[in-house]
Image (cartoon, rainbow, N blue to C red):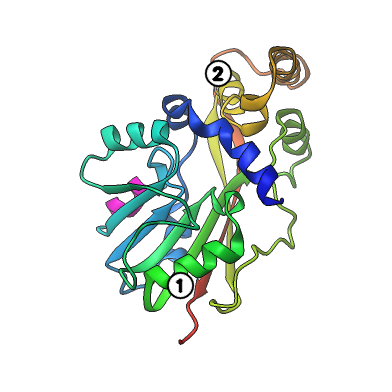
């Protein structure tokens, strides 16, 4: 998407940090193992949001700095992870020192940046032999009923199987990994998850009501789920890692 469209959509996340934190899932441990260099000590999590992925990095013993442009999201992160250093910034302008970290991560966030500018900034902040790592959780749309659910929710972060995130020339060709898994969720939780997405957040009252109505019909009437009863929602996690080229 172009920069104007990117900024327009990103405004949806200026508020609603607490709700986002309550409904968005964690990432598989295998994805983190793939994304992180073995000798990494310091990590920068850009587009950290409320700290969902940041917390997982911290649990691995890394020194983590969280970078996030939304003050509302940062407020939630600071309460959740008071031990983490945080900065109000963007992928294009992190405000961090040159050659100050071993790995820079983007969880559900690379599509919000200008990839050329963000790649140049990542290269500036990474130490020699550092790594840029990107990850997305998305519905496993290879399952037909999940594909229809994603369309009803307007889940815009569902990538094609051959998708490769664009990077600047500062990095080697990215390596990729993927993992399928299931998340137990009730129909009500799925509807709340839809409310955390940019399409819903930017929509007017009529569109929001239509999305909620369509989801209720699909989950309860069409699929036959029972209110309050969890079911297995198939997920697919895609991750990429790219090494910094020698200067």
Q: Nearer the viewer, residue 20 or 185?
A: 20
Task: Determine whether, in the image, residue 179 is placed left or right of residue 244.
Answer: right
Sequence-earlier tag: 2 or 1 = 1
In this figure, which residue is indicated by the disc labeled 1? 123
Tell me the residue at 53%/37% (across/down).
Answer: 183
Tell me the residue at 59%/77% (across/down).
Answer: 169
Task: Determine whether, in the image, residue 54 is placed left or right of residue 233.
Answer: left
Q: Nearer the viewer, residue 222 or 35?
A: 35
Asked which quadrant contains residue 4, the reply is: top right
Tell me the residue at 57%/34% (across/down).
Answer: 11
Q: Position of residue 238 (x, y in %)?
A: 59, 56
Specify the principal SS of the magenta part. helix
The numbered mark at residue 229 is 2
Q: Which residues are magenta?
A: 54-60
Q: Position of residue 85 (x, y in %)?
A: 26, 49
Residue 88 can be seen in this image? yes
């Amino acid at each position: 998407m172009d920069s104007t469209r990117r900024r327009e959509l990103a405004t949806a996340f200026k508020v609603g940090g607490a709700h986002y934190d309550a409904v968005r899932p964690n990432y598989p441990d295998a994805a983190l193992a793939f994304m992180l260099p073995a000798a990494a000590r310091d990590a920068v999590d850009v587009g950290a949001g409320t700290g969902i992925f940041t917390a997982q990095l911290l649990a691995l013993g890394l020194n983590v700095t969280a970078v996030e442009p939304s003050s509302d999201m940062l407020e939630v992160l600071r309460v959740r992870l008071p031990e983490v250093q945080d900065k109000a910034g963007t992928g294009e302008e992190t405000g961090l020192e040159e050659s100050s970290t071993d790995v820079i991560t983007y969880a559900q966030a690379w599509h919000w940046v200008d990839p050329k500018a963000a790649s140049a900034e990542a290269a500036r902040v990474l130490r020699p032999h550092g790594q840029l790592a990107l990850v997305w959780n998305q519905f496993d749309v290879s399952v037909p009923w999940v594909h229809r659910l994603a369309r009803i929710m307007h889940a815009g972060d569902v990538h094609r199987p051959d998708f490769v995130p664009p990077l600047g020339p500062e990095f080697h060709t990215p390596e990729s990994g993927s993992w399928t898994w299931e998340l137990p969720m009730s129909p009500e939780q799925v509807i709340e998850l839809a409310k955390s997405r940019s399409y819903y957040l930017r929509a007017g009252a009529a569109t929001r009501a239509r999305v909620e109505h369509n989801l209720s019909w699909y989950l309860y009437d069409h699929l036959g789920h029972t209110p309050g009863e969890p079911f297995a929602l198939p997920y697919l996690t895609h991750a990429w890692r790219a090494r910094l080229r020698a200067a």
